[in-house]
Image (spheres, rainbow, N blue to C red):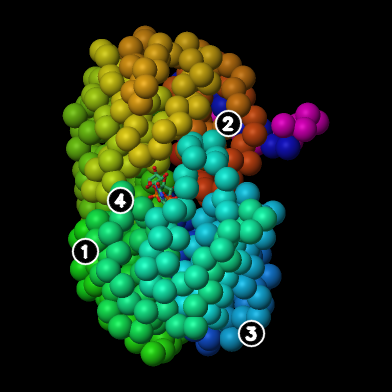
Amino acid sequence: MDQLKIEGGRPLKGSIRISGAKNAALPVIAATILTGGWFHINNCPRLRDIDTFLKLLKELGIEVIDGTDDDDRCLEIDSSGLSNHEAAYELVRTMRASVLVLGPLVARMGKARISLPGGCAIGARPIDLHLKGLEKMGARLKLKEGYVEASASRLKGAEIYFDTPTVTGTENLMMAATIAKGASVLKNAAREPEVVTLGEMLNHMGARIRGLGTPTITIEGVNELRPAAWRIIPDRIEAGTYMMAVGAAGGEITINDAHAEHLQAVIAKLKCAGLQIEEAGPNLFIRKKGRLQSVDIKTLPYPGFPTDLQAQMMTLMATAEGLSVITETIFENRFMHVAEIRRLGADIKVEGRSAIVRGVNGLKGAPVMATDLRASASLVLAGLAAKGMTTISRVYHLDRGYEAMEKKLAAAGARIAREKTETPY
Ligand code: EPU
């Protein structure tokens, strides 16, 4: 098992390039199920979650060529050989996003058998809204032995209202609706950039989708789609994490290939906290001068402050001047990092859905344990900020969603290294 060792207190300098977005790549790859023929997907991140998803596609009988073009990961995918319609428990339990094959499978094959994802480290995370939507489109659903079995001769368009905006729920039903009979309207749909880029790709494949980026998405079903070439958008969560790394470690860096317009809520809050941020085309220049000031944060669906940056922001607030209230409204249990950041000397108290963070003068290195993907990133930032050595175990969580994080940070001057341990955690 790998662990990360960080010797904190060294300011960052230089530049960091942002990889393709995990949460954009997963639905884009799922969309290849909708029609046979070769798809070309580039700027795909090298991440464990992507590898897991490609493994699932191969189990469905889909051909995948995983290549490189000028250091860029390119995938060639052809689902002409689609022969299986099951996503097994072993894969779904390691990655909930496997549920993204549900909509495309029912739409194309008329059937799907998907293991129900259980709860996870950040909350219960049901998929009831995905299922209700499919049912409205005419799918018959059965729950059997922990699996949901869906079938339909051909899905039909429907008006679907989401009780709460759901990212993968919107993606699943939008994909399913592209080849359903008739029109569908998704109301209170998610507006995240990852949903928009998926919709744009589907339109490029011949789908007829309007209203992307708004709460009402309209889809006119078509009889057939065609394969396409698509480039994965930059990862806004990775970019936000490195902006915050400057807040934690100090110094100044240029972040290349960030998409500033996807980060407006984050940029606004970081500027309020005192970070200097300049937007220059696809790049962002970040500088820290002096101690940060506390700001309050409330996570919200896009364009609000993203839940996927809440833990990292909490690390910044741990050493900012003043008191910060961080409220998590998306997931009910996304404070697992609090106990770990406290081990470095932070003063954080959780009350219900809010964490009250009293900024301290500095953190001190300690051994800590990663509990989920974004919590791991918050611990890396805490390690960069802290005096002395921080050792983070269970970094496999980090590898699910950050490409070569320690290499990118080391190239920007951080003292961070990965090592193998004998212990099984
Ligand atoms: N929800 C329901 N029923 C549903 C679906 C969602 O109650 O059928 C609830 C969830 O429990 C949650 C809220 O709706 O309280 C929003 O969840 P959403 O469905 O939007 O989350 P998701 O689609 O499962 C994606 C990202 C997450 C990110 C969230 C929120 C992917 C593959 N995952 O998850 O990313 O936190 O949206 O923005 O796109 C991560 O990358 O670390 C990560 C967890």
Would you call the spot at circle 1 few (<14 residues within 10 Å), some (14-19), or many (20 or more)? some
Any magenta on residue 422? yes
Would you call the spot at circle 3 few (<14 residues within 10 Å), some (14-19), or many (20 or more)? few
Q: Position of residue 421 (x, y in %)?
A: 76, 31
Would you call the spot at circle 4 few (<14 residues within 10 Å), some (14-19), or many (20 or more)? few
- Residue toward you, 84 or 254: 84
Which residue corresponds to mark 3?
A: 81
Q: Is residue 293 visible?
A: yes
* Quadrant hosting residue 66: bottom right
Q: What residue appears at the point 19 percent right and 29 percent down from the top-left corner?
A: 272
| Quadrant housing the N terminus | top right
How far apart are labels 3 and 2 at the CA level?
A: 39 Å
Question: Mark 1 or mark 3, which has the lower sequence index?
Answer: 3
Mark drawn on residue 163: 4
Question: Mark 2 or mark 4, which has the lower sequence index?
Answer: 4
Which three-letter amino acid code belongs to the residue tagged 2?
Ala
Q: Nearer the viewer, mark 2 or mark 4?
A: 4
Q: What residue appears at the point 49 percent right and 33 percent down from the top-left corner?
A: 375
Note whether 107 is above or below 216 in the view shown: below
Which residue corresponds to mark 1?
A: 216
Which three-letter amino acid code belongs to the residue tagged 1?
Thr
Give the SS element for disc 4: loop
Question: Mark 1 or mark 4, which has the lower sequence index?
Answer: 4
How far apart are labels 1 and 3 at the CA level?
A: 34 Å
Question: Mark 4 or mark 3, which has the lower sequence index?
Answer: 3
Note whether 61 is above or below 144 in the view shown: below
Note whether 27 is above or below 241 in the view shown: below
